Image: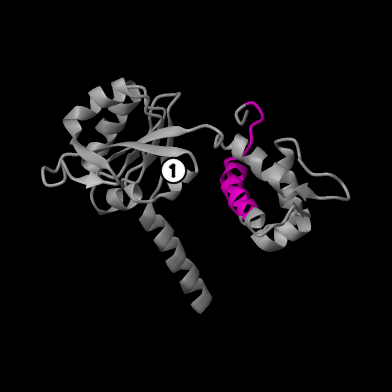
């Protein structure tokens, strides 16, 4: 859908914010909301909200606004959250363990099924009922199980080779926390997450505020 309509990545990146805010509205018992009210909550213009949602059909009714439950459900479908996605983590150091313990993933349909590391001190350790396996076991595991997403929290010296292997073994998505951008074959999606970039952006904002 997104490729055919050439929807910008900026719009796609706003969808999870819509989804989260709509979930909070549902939790608070809100059943309908106008684009103006949603814009005040999200600090995005009402015009931008309407433009974003019109990429996928609009969903609103003039004079009524948006049905919160319906819009939340439809955005979930667009994001693929009505399906379940199996995940593994490659690199179970501090960050990998923190991600493994993040229970909200499962609530969103992202099921962690495997943990892998090269460190013999970590192999055999149990995290939320999953035993950390040696990375040498990963190929057989991935080929035996349907793995949709691999979370990469490993040194940059090994991550490119690992990513290429995972792509060749049929993993369709890579969530990369290693400090290097990954480029893989067509058909495999990559989300590169550079934590230091976000921190440097925050430092810039602080610096600008001081000036």
Q: In this view, does 180 lie to the left or right of 189?
A: left
Front residue of 192 and 143: 143
Task: Report the residue at 40% width, 38% height from top.
Answer: 111
Residue 132 in magenta? no
**What segment is highlighted magenta in the picture?**
4-23
Q: Would you identify the image quadrant in which residue 85 lies?
A: top left
Under tag 1, what secondary structure? helix
Q: Which residue is drawn at 33% across and 47% down?
A: 100
Q: Is residue 211 visible?
A: no
- From the viewer's perspective, is residue 113 above or below residue 33? above
Asked if 170 appears above or below 156 in the picture, the reply is above
Q: Is residue 50 left or right of residue 18?
A: right
Magenta segment main secondary structure:
helix
Q: Can residue 80 be seen in this view?
A: yes
Q: In which quarter of the image is the N terminus?
A: top right
Circle 1 residue: 106
Q: Can you give x and y, in whole percent of width and height, for residue 196 in the image?
A: 36, 57
User: Against 57, is 34 above or below?
Assistant: below
Identified at 38% across, 51% down, the residue is: 102
Q: Which residue is drawn at 87% across and 46% down?
A: 62
Q: In which quarter of the image is residue 142?
A: top left
User: Residue 99: x percent and y percent?
Assistant: 35, 49
Q: Looking at the picture, does residue 41 appear above or below residue 123?
A: below
Where is residue 159 shown, x and y percent of the image?
27, 38
């Amino acid at each position: 859908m997104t490729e055919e309509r050439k929807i910008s990545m900026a719009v796609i990146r706003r969808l999870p914010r819509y989804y989260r805010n709509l979930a909070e509205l549902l939790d608070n018992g809100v059943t309908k909301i106008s684009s103006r009210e949603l814009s005040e909550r999200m600090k995005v213009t009402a015009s931008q909200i309407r433009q974003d949602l019109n990429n996928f059909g609009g969903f609103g009714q003039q004079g009524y606004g948006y049905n919160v439950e319906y819009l939340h459900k439809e955005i979930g479908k667009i994001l693929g959250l009505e399906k379940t996605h199996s995940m593994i983590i490659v690199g179970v150091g501090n960050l990998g363990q923190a991600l493994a313990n993040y229970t909200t993933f499962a609530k969103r349909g992202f099921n962690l099924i495997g943990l892998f590391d090269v460190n013999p001190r970590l192999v055999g350790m149990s995290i939320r009922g999953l035993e950390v396996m040696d990375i040498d076991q990963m190929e057989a595991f991935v080929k035996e199980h349907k793995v949709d997403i691999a979370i990469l929290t490993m040194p940059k010296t090994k991550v490119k080779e690992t990513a290429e292997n995972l792509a060749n073994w049929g993993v369709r998505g890579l969530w990369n926390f290693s400090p290097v951008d990954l480029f893989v074959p067509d058909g495999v999606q990559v989300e590169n997450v550079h934590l230091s970039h976000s921190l440097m952006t925050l430092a810039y904002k602080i610096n600008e505020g001081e000036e």
